[in-house]
Structures are given as C-alpha cells and as structure tokens.
Image (spheres, rainbow, N blue to C red):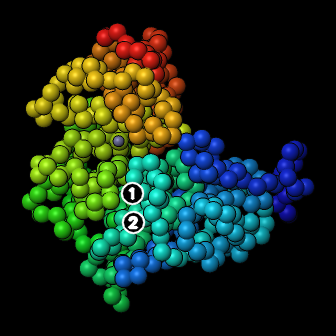
Amino acid sequence: MTLVLLVTGCTGHDDRSGLRAGAADAGDPYVPGYGNGGYDVAGYRLRVRYDPADDRLTGHATVTATATEGLSRFNLDLAGLTVSSVRVDGANARHARDGRELVVTPARGLPRGARFTVDVEYAGVPQSVAESTLGGGGFLATADGAIALGQPDSAATWFPVNDHPSDKAGYEVEVTVPDGLAALSNGVPLGRTSGGGWTTWRWAERAPMASYLSFLVIGDYRVDTGTHAGRPIVTAVAASLPADGPAAASVARTGEIADFLAERFGPYPFEAYGGIAVADERVGYALETQSRPVYGPGFFRSGRPDPGVVAHELAHQWFGDSVSLARWSDIWLNEGFATYAEWLWAEHDGGPTAQRSFELRYAATDWSEPSVDPGRAGMFGTAVYQRGALAAHALRRTVGDDAFFRILRAWTAERRGGTATTADFVALAERVCGRRLGALFDAWLAGGTAPALP
Ligand SMILES: [Zn+2]
C-alpha cells in the first residue's frame, strides 16, 4: 500500500500526490513565523548536553506528532544551531534551514491522521533572542551555566519545536551537565545519574504544556527537593544569592501560596510544584514556566521578600499554563487573572483589600489602551495586566463573590490542559451566571472611557 492512496478527493494541493507542504507558521499575527501548520505534537523527548566551558549544546529531540493534513513536508521552529540528521519514523529525511525554520521532507509523505516520529540531531552554541518583547529571552549562557527562558520566544533557541501555545504537548527532558552543576526543568524530577564527570538530570512534564513555558536552568544552585500536598516540590536558588535572603524566603512560600490560590481557583493543575530564583541580571522578569516559575533577581533587590510575584506566577499555573492562549492577542486572560491574584494575596497577607487595589488602579488607568488585542508592542503593556485585573474585579462586583469564583473554577476545570479565547471566557461566565455579560467585558477590557463603577 502506498501512502498517497489513503488520501483521495483532495483539491488545491501543490502536488499530484494529494499531499502538500505544512504551513510555515501558526497564523498568529503577533508572532509571524512562529509555530507551524499541518500537524499536532503529542510529545517532545529532549536529550541535551551542555558544557559551560565552551557554551556548546548537543541535542537529540524526538517529536511525536499526528498529521492534521496530508503532508509532503513540514516545518519545525529552530533558531540557530546546526542540524546533522533528521529521521521521520526511523527513515532519513531531507532537511533544510530557512531562517528559524527547519524544513523537513520525509522520504514518504504523511497521510492525514498518521502518527509519526521525528528525530532531530543538532548541536551548536545557542543564542539569545535579541528582539524578545519581554527582554532577555531565549538561551543565555551565564557565568556558571545557562538559562533558557522567555515569552513568547525561547523554546526554539534550544530545541526544534512547534513554537506556538496552540500546540501543547507533554515533555520529557534529560539534561547532561558537568558534575556539580544543577540542571533544572519542568515537572516531576525523575532522578539523576552520573558517569565520566557528567551528571544527567531527568524531568517529565506530562500535562500538556505550551512551548514558551518550557525552560532550562543550569548552574550552581542550592536545590531543595521535598513533597507538598502529595506531590514533589523542587525549589532552587542561585548559590550566589544568600541562603537566608529575600529570594530564598519568597520561593520558600511556594506551597503555601499555591494552596491559597487552589482554594479560589480550583485544584492545583500539575503533578509537581516549585520555583527557581536566578541571579543573572539579564533576566529582568519572572516567568510562569509550567509547574516551576523562574524569578529574576530584580524582584528581591529591595532586600525584602516578594510573595506577590510568587502569587502572580503561581496564579498563571491555572491561568495561562493549564488553560492556555489559542492566540497571543488574548494575553489578558493570563495577565489579568495573575494580577488579580496579586490583589487577592495582598488582602490575605495583610495588605490592601482587593476592593482598595481596584479603586486605586481604576483612578490611575489610561482607558485609551485596550487589554484585548493590544497589538504586538502592547503584549506586556499595563492595560493587559491592570485592565484585565480591573475587569475581573468588576465581574466579581457585578455577579457576586459566589458566582465569580464559580466562574473561575468552572473555567479552570472545563478548559484544563487546553487552549481558549476571550469569547470562550465570556460565554462560560454568561452560562454560569445565566445573564448577558458581553457589554461589561467590552467596557472594562476595551472601552475607550472609564466604565461606570459596578
Ligand atoms: Zn504574568
């Protein structure tokens, strides 16, 4: 049987086999060129070795996917690095580079619905992403190791990937580093083995994960491994930061803060907990990397702990990580609820009430900036965060505490592990409350003038 016989009646294809080239991006105008079309990834198995002595990374990625259309060829995203071999279902495949695209032409086409495996061998000195919106994104070589982190772009700087949150997948990561260094990533720790001066650390994130939520942190860290609520908790603080300093004290509250949020948002969505405080000043942000956020040093510069940033990044485990964006223009769904979690935590922790935070922010808001579809340049703008949180509180004031938290819990339960849009959220809120809420969301998220206080 030949593969092409399985595909009949198709039109508009660019060759006579009924197969065509998969799209070279996910069609998201905020990240042109990112992601790809024609397949859906189920899992990544990444085996990488990194040597801080020469910054060289050697990798073997195994990507398991299903063709969503008949494919004569398809793309993966890979920035920099040199590919030495690509195999599809064990057979050598032709491969070519086109900017940050890796174009793979299998020896035989892939019919729609076919499950296939791609093995990519690659190596090189990984590069950062100079134009990253959040700053300092992608792979950073550090004094003692490396940090691969960033939103929206980081994953493609260290492995071949369908680099868009609309294609979530499970991950197994093995990282081999010189003995004495830690190698941290997402999910459950699966132990480590040493030999010949190298140590391999193994991690598994089995819940679907968006590519930008993957990370690597390699270096000299104090690593704490324990159990919280029956699940592994792994925290780590750069050895150059004080053991009793504000970063360590903040990360140490991870379990307590996750439990506080779970009481409001529903069960914690992942198999592991954690948090990592890095010391590299180029990481000027914290990121909600799945099951184990990474915190840059700026949050702790005052000398005081910052549990608010921990509440923000842990809130993303529900809003952004478990329920992910189908497209970046809805990023307020992530940042609005994470910011609102900061208000909730502040009230719980002896700070201002959520109502007071709402009033202060309402008075300070520039209503000309929308939080829905803020434009690529506005992805991490104030409106996305603050108008999003204002909208959350306005919804709470309008429907009442009971209905508000029922909406949040229904959202995190029904959309767990998937992706969603603003329209999905509004529809769910209307269904839970049995009333129309479109005008409320329009006014608080996108209206050009201050909405009436609810
Ligand atoms: Zn955030």
Given residues 335 and 376, the one toward you in this image is: 376
In the image, the residue with mark 1 has its CB under 8 Å from the nearest atom of ligand 1: no
431 on left or right of 284: right
Q: Which residue is mark 1?
A: 136
Quadrant containing the N terminus is bottom right
Given residues 296 and 198, the one toward you in this image is: 296
Residue found 31% across the figure and 50% down from its top: 286
Residue 140 numbered mark, or none: 2
* Circle 2 SS class: strand
User: Callout 2: few (<14), some (14-19), or many (20+) C-alpha neighbours within 10 Å?
Assistant: many
What amino acid is labelled 1 in the image?
Answer: Gly
Where residue 6 appears, as percent x and y from the top left, is: 83, 54
Where residue 76 appears, as percent x and y from the top left, is: 62, 60
What amino acid is labelled 2 in the image?
Answer: Leu
Residue found 39% across the figure and 52% down from its top: 135
Where residue 42 appears, as percent x and y from the top left, is: 56, 55
* In this view, 64 is above or below 23: below
Residue found 42% across the figure and 71% down from its top: 174
Quadrant containing the C terminus is top left
Residue found 11% across the figure and 57% down from its top: 245
Given residues 81 and 22, the one toward you in this image is: 81
Where residue 210 appears, as percent x and y from the top left, is: 48, 50
